[in-house]
Image: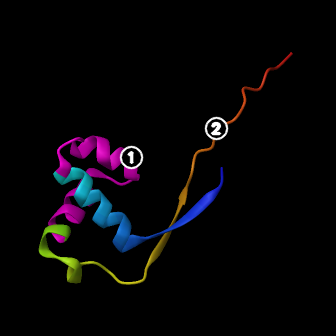
Amino acid sequence: MPWMETNVRDERGRFVHDFESGHWSMTELCERYGVSRPTGYKWLARGRKGARAWPTGATRRISVPTARAPTWRR
């Protein structure tokens, strides 16, 4: 599976934005972002405090699923 680096501040900001949109539950977002529910609630609380609550310049490596053709075994 290929890897991609993402900016932590941007990723957490998207998490808060997605939660506040009302389209996803906390459980769905935590699964989507690959974090635990306590971490999701921590991100939400910090996100509502403003940008200064986030760490700066940190990056995180995440796996990105790719579409593959099915493999057939004989």
Residue drawn at the location 37% of the way across and 64% of the way down: 11
Mark 1 Cα-neighbour bin, 10 Å: few <14, some 14–19, many ≥20: few
Which region shows up in magenta? 21-46
Kindly indicate the quadrant of the structure image that contains residue 72: top right
Could you tell me residue 38's position as x and y percent? Answer: 23, 56
Q: Amino acid at mark 2?
A: Ala
Kindly indicate the quadrant of the structure image that contains residue 9: bottom left
Could you tell me residue 17's position as x and y percent? Answer: 24, 58
Residue 24 belongs to the span the image colors magenta: yes
Q: Amino acid at mark 1?
A: Arg
Q: Is residue 48 left or right of residue 15?
A: left
Q: Is residue 15 left or right of residue 44?
A: right
The residue wearing badge 1 is 32
Could you tell me residue 43's position as x and y percent? Answer: 24, 64
Mark 2 Cα-neighbour bin, 10 Å: few <14, some 14–19, many ≥20: few
In the displayed structure, would residue 21 be above or below residue 72? below
The residue wearing badge 2 is 67
Q: Nearer the viewer, residue 18 or 62?
A: 18
